[in-house]
């Protein structure tokens, strides 16, 4: 028996395939006990009633067992190392969940009067002011529901500012060639066009920035969107100079703050010249967002941009009570229903309050230390274009590897990523910000033991590529599902049970 056959026999083959819930259907069984009807029975009007449904029926325990089996097969940040670069999949302290689930928060109705939700408004006001302080900027709006939504909202604010100052022609936004896909998408959504600025060795090319401004015309530019540290895991040390160039053009510097995990407590974006930024509270302040879970993307802006922020804004009155201000005459209006993504902001408040100023500094220091530790251990086997500690080139909170020497031996990047699944590691972000790269972000919540075992896994995979390449090429061999065709799954998903 070959090694591969042996692995397949003892692992995947042993775990029975979980049938679909439709396949387990037992006719006539009801798993719910409805309370006795306490209103008079009435016919559903014809126009409202739909056709009959074909939902499966079960006993309560069978439903529990079905979903528990499925959840056992989930890969989660609670159970595994999840170094998904740029996504900051860190441990979510359970006190956050406790706070968010308190009935006084979880059972609020978003249309309650301000005087009945004073505790919730206080929490939002304190979150607002803490985020203002961390950003070094004048005012925060908690409304946007995710990072991309924050980008969109802040650009709307910037455009409203220019329209109000007689410069409606400022409709072009500059973005680095390493920018996250949401940057150009948000610009387009709010009616701005995008021009790309080159990066060299992961840093903004200042000459190209000046060139692009000259070609487009300074008077047409609304903002430069920069991610710092960049998605190559590098802090752009020229950021003050960049801010000067952008401001000289009369435009605004927008910071994509998705990577604030590397800056917390050490650098304030307002101090290096950012006029506006968004947070991904669901990354930087826990609440991991894998699987499209809830997010929150507050934005912070300078005093001159503040009048255009969305409403309602949470405020503190002179008597110390809290209220929602809906009466700002220059506001861009609402960007979502109700006030904000409340539950995620409870977790954000809890995380920041538990850390305190020193703790936040410790977060960013440890996140950066952990990334550099991994990079130093792996860089001789997994080539790293931007990491060269002997020449003073370190990474920020994440690093990029282009493992060319391993790829040259006959594996693809996806083979390496799939083999990582066999070792219980979530594959890192791939092919971004450059082709054939893995972007690894360990975060500060991983122990040295977890980091060391990741190093062992990566070195073991490199060893297998030399000695038993089929193991890597045919992986995953030990997961519940064999190698999936991700492209077909994304482009031609089969979403119905036949
Ligand atoms: C650099 C960067 N910008 C923006 C975003 C968008 O944030 P969101 O997914 O919350 O919309 C992300 C998401 O991970 C990101 O990594």
Image (spheres, helix red, strand yellow):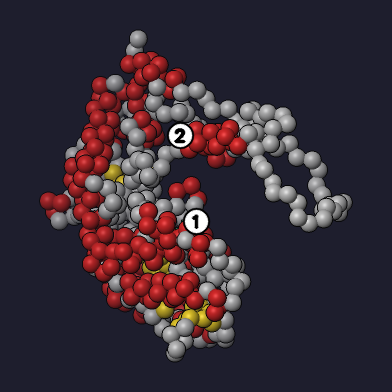
In-image side of 38 versus 254 (left or right): right
Question: Badge 1 local density, few (<14 within 10 Å), some, or many (20+)?
Answer: some
Q: Nearer the viewer, residue 290 or 378?
A: 290
Q: Which residue is mark 1?
A: 294
Task: Name the residue at 65% across, 38% down.
Answer: 31
Seen as rendered, the residue at the extreme top is: 1
Task: Name the residue at 69% across, 49% down.
Answer: 35
Q: Position of residue 494 (x, y in %)?
A: 62, 35
In-image side of 62 versus 184 (left or right): right
Up-down relation of residue 425 to residue 266 (above or below)? above
Q: Are marks 1 and 2 in contact (CB under 8 Å)?
A: no
Sequence order check: which comes first, mark 1 or mark 2?
2
Q: Which residue is mark 2?
A: 73
Up-down relation of residue 160 to residue 483 (above or below)? below
Mark 1 vs mark 2, CA separation in Å: 21 Å
Q: Position of residue 302 (x, y in %)?
A: 40, 80
Q: Position of residue 381 (x, y in %)?
A: 21, 37
Task: Name the residue at 27% across, 53% down.
Answer: 444
Per the rendering, the mark at residue 59 is: none
Q: Position of residue 253 (x, y in %)?
A: 39, 73
């Amino acid at each position: 028996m070959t090694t591969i056959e042996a692995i397949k026999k003892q692992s995947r083959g042993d775990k029975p395939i979980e049938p679909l819930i439709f396949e387990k259907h037992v006719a006539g069984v009801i798993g719910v006990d409805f309370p006795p009807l306490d209103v008079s029975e009435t016919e559903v009007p014809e126009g409202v009633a739909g056709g009959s449904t074909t939902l499966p029926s079960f006993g309560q325990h069978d439903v529990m067992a079905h979903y528990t089996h499925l959840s056992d097969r989930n890969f989660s940040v609670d159970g595994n190392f999840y170094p998904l670069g740029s996504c900051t999949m860190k441990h979510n302290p359970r006190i956050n969940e406790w706070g968010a689930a308190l009935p006084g928060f979880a059972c609020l109705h978003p249309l309650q009067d301000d005087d009945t939700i004073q505790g919730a408004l206080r929490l939002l006001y304190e979150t607002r002011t803490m985020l203002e302080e961390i950003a070094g900027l004048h005012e925060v709006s908690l409304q946007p529901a995710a990072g991309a939504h924050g980008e969109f909202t802040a650009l709307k604010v910037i455009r409203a500012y220019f329209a109000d100052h007689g410069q409606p022609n400022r409709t072009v936004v500059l973005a680095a060639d390493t920018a996250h896909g949401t940057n150009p998408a948000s610009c387009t959504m709010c009616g701005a066009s995008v021009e790309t600025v080159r990066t060299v060795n992961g840093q903004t090319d200042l000459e190209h920035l000046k060139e692009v401004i000259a070609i487009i015309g300074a008077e047409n530019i609304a903002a430069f969107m920069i991610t710092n540290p960049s998605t190559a895991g590098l802090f752009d040390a020229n950021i003050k100079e960049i801010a000067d160039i952008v401001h000289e053009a009369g435009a605004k510097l927008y910071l994509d703050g998705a990577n604030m995990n590397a800056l917390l407590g050490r650098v304030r974006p307002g101090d290096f010249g950012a006029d506006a930024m968004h947070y991904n509270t669901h990354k930087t302040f826990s609440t991991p967002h894998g699987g499209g879970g809830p997010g929150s993307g507050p934005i912070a802006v300078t005093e001159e941009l503040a009048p255009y922020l969305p409403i309602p804004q949470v405020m503190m009155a002179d008597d110390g009570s809290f209220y929602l201000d809906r009466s700002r005459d220059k506001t861009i209006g609402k960007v979502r229903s109700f006030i904000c993504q409340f539950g995620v902001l409870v977790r954000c408040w809890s995380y920041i309050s538990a850390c305190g100023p020193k703790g936040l500094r410790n977060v960013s220091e440890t996140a950066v230390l952990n990334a550099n530790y991994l990079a130093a251990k792996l860089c001789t086997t997994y080539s790293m274009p931007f990491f060269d500690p002997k020449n003073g080139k370190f990474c920020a909170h994440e690093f990029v590897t282009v493992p060319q020497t391993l790829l040259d031996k006959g594996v693809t990047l996806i083979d390496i990523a799939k083999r990582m699944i066999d070792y219980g590691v979530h594959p890192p972000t791939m092919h971004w910000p450059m082709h054939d790269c893995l972007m690894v972000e360990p975060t500060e919540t991983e122990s040295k033991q977890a980091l060391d075992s990741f190093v062992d896994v990566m070195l073991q995979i490199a060893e297998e590529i030399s000695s038993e390449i089929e193991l890597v090429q045919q992986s995953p061999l030990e997961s519940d599902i064999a190698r999936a065709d991700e492209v077909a799954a994304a482009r031609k998903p089969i979403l119905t049970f036949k």
